[in-house]
């Protein structure tokens, strides 16, 4: 079984993790089944504010390219930056879709948006280079 838990309160995340660990231990003890809990990614809630110049510039660039920004928390390489208090964002280069059944994962990537995605990436890098998005 795989699942993801997202929350803006680190105390609540800790509580949920402890509850899951307790449930797994209880099920293992009662059934004799070996259960392994594998936490493959973890980060402290939070990130940079929507008012941060990096976010504002990225949103303006997306708007100029006719791309609707999608703002949501992610568990990614950004965690390493956030731990060091380095402002960072995730940029999507293409549009994808992932449908997951019990034993089968069906994924697709739309090729056409890659051109706008690469333009977005280049524009954000230029804004950073010019000091506009720090």
Image: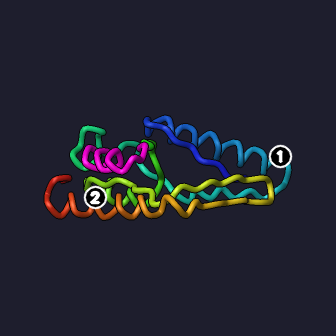
User: Image point 14% across, 61% down: which residue?
Assistant: 130
Drawn side of residue 22 relative to residue 61, left or right: right
Name above or below for residue 103 compared with residue 6.
Answer: below
Q: Which residue is mark 1?
A: 30
Residue 124: which numbered mark, if any?
A: 2
Drawn side of residue 1 relative to residue 16, left or right: right
**Distance CA(mark 1)–CA(mark 2):** 54 Å
Give the magenta part as a residue range: 56-69
Q: Residues within 10 Å of mark 1 (few under 14, many from 20)?
A: few
Query: Could you tell me residue 18's position as x and y percent?
Result: 58, 42
User: Image point 59% across, 61% down: which residue?
Assistant: 109
Examine the structure image and report whether residue 106 is included in the region drawn in magenta: no
**Tag in front: 1 or 2:** 2
Closest to the observer: 2 or 87? 87
Residue furthest out toward the right: 31
Query: Could you tell me residue 114's position as x and y percent?
Result: 47, 63
User: Image point 36% across, 51% down: which residue?
Assistant: 65
Chain-order first, disc 1 or disc 2: 1
The overriding secondary structure of the stretch rendered in magenta is helix
Query: Could you tell me residue 8's position as x and y percent?
Result: 43, 36
Closest to the observer: 63 or 87? 63
Examine the structure image and report whether residue 60 is included in the region drawn in magenta: yes
């Amino acid at each position: 079984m795989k699942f993801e838990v997202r929350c803006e309160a680190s105390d609540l995340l800790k509580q949920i993790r402890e509850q899951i660990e307790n449930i797994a231990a209880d099920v293992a003890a009662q059934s004799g089944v070996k259960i392994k809990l594998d936490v493959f990614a973890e980060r402290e809630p939070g990130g940079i504010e929507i008012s941060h110049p990096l976010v504002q510039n990225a949103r303006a660039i997306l708007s100029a390219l006719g791309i609707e920004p999608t703002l949501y928390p992610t568990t990614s390489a950004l965690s390493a930056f956030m731990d060091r208090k380095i402002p960072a964002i995730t940029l999507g280069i293409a549009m994808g879709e992932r449908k997951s059944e019990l034993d089968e994962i069906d994924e697709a990537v739309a090729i056409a948006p890659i051109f706008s995605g690469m333009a977005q990436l280049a524009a954000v890098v230029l804004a950073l280079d010019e000091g506009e998005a720090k």
